Each structure stands twice: as structure tokens, then as C-alpha cells.
Image (cartoon, helix red, strand yellow):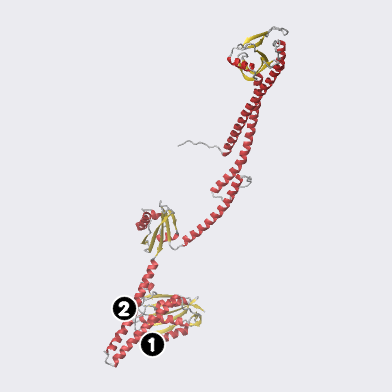
Amino acid sequence: MKPFKPSLSIGTKMLISHVSLAILVTALASVLSYALSSHYIRQTRIDELMVKAEHIAESARTPEDGGIMPARHTVRIYEELTDAKVFFLDAGSSDVIRMSKYHADAPEDSEGDIQWIEVLDSIDRQFAERVLAGEKVSALRRFEFAQDVIIFAGVPITDENQAIRGGVILAQPVAQLRSLSRMIRFMLAAVVGVSVLLAILMAMQEAQMLVRPLQRITRAARRMEDGVYAERISSLPANEIGDLGRALNSMSGRLMDVIRNLRKERDKLQLVISGMGEGLFAVDKRWNIVHANAAFLELTELTDASDLLDEACDSRYEPLRALLLRCMKSGQPEEIEWQNASRRAISVEASALRDENDAILGTVCLLRDVSEAQRLEQLRRDYVANISHELRTPLTGIRGMVEPLIDGCMDTEEERQESYRVILKETIRLEKLVGEMLDMSRLQDGRISVELEPMELPGILEAAVRSMSAIAEEAGVALRVETDGTRLACLGNEDRIMQVLVILLDNALSFTPRGGSVTVFARDAGSHIDVGVRDTGCGIEPKDLPLIWERFYKADRSRMRTTGTGLGLSIAKLVTQLMGGDISVKSDPGKGAEFTFTLKKA
């Protein structure tokens, strides 16, 4: 593990960079200033010394016939005036260059204190030769005859005819120049120190001016990172950092709008997914559950969606796990039909989720309960089969009678009349079947509307009994009406009430043996009126009770006197519901059954 290295803050870095730059610039300026000032002072001194040497050479000019070099007191005057040592060169011999030297211990008025020495050092000799050659020479260097670093200025001495008779050299030690340089260096050092201090103060102030807005921007950005998108930055400067803060404020506002819209869309999508009747289940490629709605849990009968991916879970979920695995590997849609614990048929479709590069990201499953669809499909098939059977029976009877008539097999009038009666009976039966099918279709489609009106039930009950009395008499069954003696006012439709009563009476007569009785009753039940038919027939088995309202369903046919279409009770139920009531049945096998439907009170 690498050791932690704390990083410097941006303010410290800016301070260091500003101070470093200030020190560097000040140091370079100081060095340049020192070099320029030193060069200027040195050059000024040399120029001044050269002018003084020219004046001395002018005053020391000798006549054409020669002369004597100035006496010591004259040289002293020169030295006091020029603040430099004065030396004279003798140009008497071209091979030997001599330089005047004064005895320091000789009296001031002595004229015999001059001593001529020969210039032997090659560098000194070159300097002297240049002067005696008529050249004005200056230098800052160490000469052998001076034994020190000295500023020299040499000027030739000419006579009236401009012939070079000698030369004068002024020599000034650099001690004064060094003292002045030290003073300049001290002043420059003081300036550098003050400049660096001011630079530090200014850099600290500038760094604070830059860092404080950045710190506020950083705090705001971190709060936005924590989800506080309403954060705003105030007191921003009018510079680029201020522009950055204002841009962050604008971005925060837009981000809030975007997130608000995304949340709305997410909530809408969640609402749609949660309200779906189909189960939705999605996993990513690492088998982490992305989504599972309530319908999925209801269809799979799981309490937790993660149980589906648990191999220790019930083995009945293995087909679903295998489906997900196949789809994840192949990337192709997969579909199976699966039964849950309640034996409901579930259609499962799995599809792969892909990104823009067509890489598989996961799998999504859609589960649909197809039990009702299968039941309806089976009902459709049964409906078609029942219609075919019910239509074939009367058509077969009609054909069985028509063919002998056509072939002339009926010899007597009595046989022909019997055939006509059978054909009529089967035709009526066929007509009744078609009529009931049309009524059923209209009732289910809502094409039949019922206008309810106030009416009294006793008269309707009597009319229903009279319409069925002939059939009851032929069957040997007694018909009677039973009421509580009140008006029994209700809201209904007379034709539809009669239709339901006829269906129930026909059904009761079919299942009541000879000698039995059928009672049509009506009674006040408080909030509504109960109307029904009670018989003393064979009754209905408990297993048949939930099914008798289905189309074409027929109970035990071995106990039926006549054959029906199996649509009557279905039509009776639809008509009763159309009038705002309900219908029910109670039965005791072997003792009879009681059908009751309700009507609203008037």
C-alpha cells in the first residue's frame, strides 16, 4: 500500500507560485540592476579619470627641446585634485620604457625625488607602449607596478609640434568603487526583501480572493453530489470564477428540472408497471434483480422475487430459472407455458436486454395468466359442439321423416300425418333453439334494453301458470300460485318477468314426476321482492349446482321427461340481472329444487 501523500491546497499552490515568481522576477531585476549600475559607475569613473589624465597631460606639455617632469609638489597637487596616483612615462628611448617613481620620504620642495624605473612586466609594458604610441588607454585591472586592482587611465604627452614626449597615467584604487557597490548591493537587497514581502502579502490576498469563491463552489458541488440540488452560490466576483459559479447555479436549476421530470417519468413508469395485469421480472447479467412487480409475485405465488433465483427453492420454479438461463446465453426470445401452485396456466416470455453495442445486459420476463383464455377457448369449442349437436338432433328427425315421404314409403294417411307431426315438433324445437341462441347473443352484447315500470306481481304469476297449464296437465303435475296476500308492487318488465317464469316452470315440469306439484311464489323480502318456482321433482346434485347457469349445460338427462336446449337458465340469469336483480337456487336431491330471483320494490 502506497503511503498517503497530502496534497497542497490550491490556495497554497497559488501562494507558492506567486511568491516564487515574484522572487524570481525581483532577483533577476536586482541582478540586472546591479550589473548595469556597477558597469555604469565603473565606466563613469574611468571616463572621469580619463578626462583628468587629459588635463594633466595638457598642463605637462614640454617644449620641443625637451624638459623636466613635474616636481613632487606638483604631482601631489595633481593627486589631490584627481584623488588618484600620478605616474609619468618617459619616451626617451624606444627600447627602454621608464616610469617615474617618487620617493615617498623626500621633502616636498625637493626636486631630486624623482626615480625612473624600467617597465619590465609584459602586460604593464603593453599598456605603456599603447600610451606612448599616442593612444588613450583605460583599464580596470591589476598592474605589477601598482600591486593592486586599480582603475587606470593613460594619456600621451605631446610637445608643441604634437610629438610624443611621454605619458601620464592616473591610477585610482577600486576600494571606493567596491564601497559604492556594497552600498548598491545593500540597497538592492533591501528592495528585494520589501518586494518579496509585498509580493507575499499581495499573493495571499489574491489567493484568498480566488480561493474563497472556489471553496464556496466546491461546497455547493459536494452538496449537489449529496442530492441537495437547490444549493445556490451567492456573492460571486465579476470574473471567470464568478462565471463558473453562475454557470453552476444555472446547471443546478436545470438539473433540478431534469431530475424532477425524470422522477415524474419514473413514477409514471412505475405506476404503469405496477398496474399491469401481466407479471414483469427483469435481471441483469450478474443475476441481480432489476425489477419485479406485484403481478409477478401474485402469478408465481412468491413472497420475495429473489426466491425465484434460489436453487434451493421449490423445484416447480426450475422451468422459469432454466428459461432465464437459456435466454441469457443465447440472446434469443424464449417462451414456455408453466403452471403455478394453484394449477393456473401461465404463459412466460423471456427476451434479452441489449445495449447500443448489441451486448446482452440482462433478461426480462413477461408472465400472463392464460387460464381464463384457455377456459374461454374450451367454452367456445363446447359451444360449437353443443350447437352442432342440438341442431343435428332436430335436423336428423326432420330428415328421417322427409325422406320416407319423398320415397313414397308412407302408404296410409295416418302414417303421413304422424310424419308431419314429427316434422312440426322438430321444427318448433329448432325454432326455439335458434330463438334462444339469438336472445342469448343479444343479452350478452347488451343489444336488449329493459324499461322498468311499477307493476303488481300476482296477476303476472297467474298469467304464467295459465300459459303452462296445458303442459302441466299433460305431464300430470299440479300447478299453483302462492303469495302473501299483499299487492307485491315491484319495478320490472312484464314480458321479461314472464320469460323468466316460463323458463323456470318449463324446467320444473321437465324434472317433476307425474303426481308431483310445481308452485309459483312471490313474497316480500324487506328490501326487495322474491319471486320463484318450487317443485317436488328429483332435485339437483350438489356437483351440478355451480354449472347449471352455463350455456348448454344439462344435468342428469336420465331423469328428464323432455329434452331442452340447455340455454334457458343462462337466459333467465341474464334477464334477471338486466332488471337489476339476481337469481339463485336451492336443492335437496330427491325432494325437489327452488329457484328464486329478486326484483326491486316499486
Say which amino acid is labelled 1. Answer: Ala
Image spot of residue 366 (x, y percent):
41, 60
Residue 526's spot in the image, x, y percent? 50, 76
Dot 2 lies on which element? helix
Q: CA distance from mark 1 to mark 2?
A: 24 Å
Q: Secondary structure at mark 1?
A: helix
Residue 326 at x, y = what percent? 36, 56
Front position in the image: 426 or 493? 426
**Does residue 538 lie above or below 12 as drawn?**
below
Q: Is residue 427 above or below residue 93?
A: below
In the image, residue 95 lies at what x, y percent? 60, 11
- Earlier along the polypeptide chain: callout 1 or callout 2? 1
Horizontal arrangement in the rendering, residue 586 relative to residue 213 (left or right) = left
Of residue 472 and residue 25, the one placed in the foreground of this image is: 25
- At label 2, the amino acid type is Ser
Most distant residue in the bottom direction? 413
The quadrant in which residue 133 appears is top right
Residue 470, disc: 1
Residue 306, above or below 467: above
Q: Residue at x 27, y 92 (%)?
A: 412
Residue toward you, 328 or 176: 176
Q: Which residue is mark 2?
A: 558
Quadrant hosting residue 100:
top right
Residue 28 in view: yes
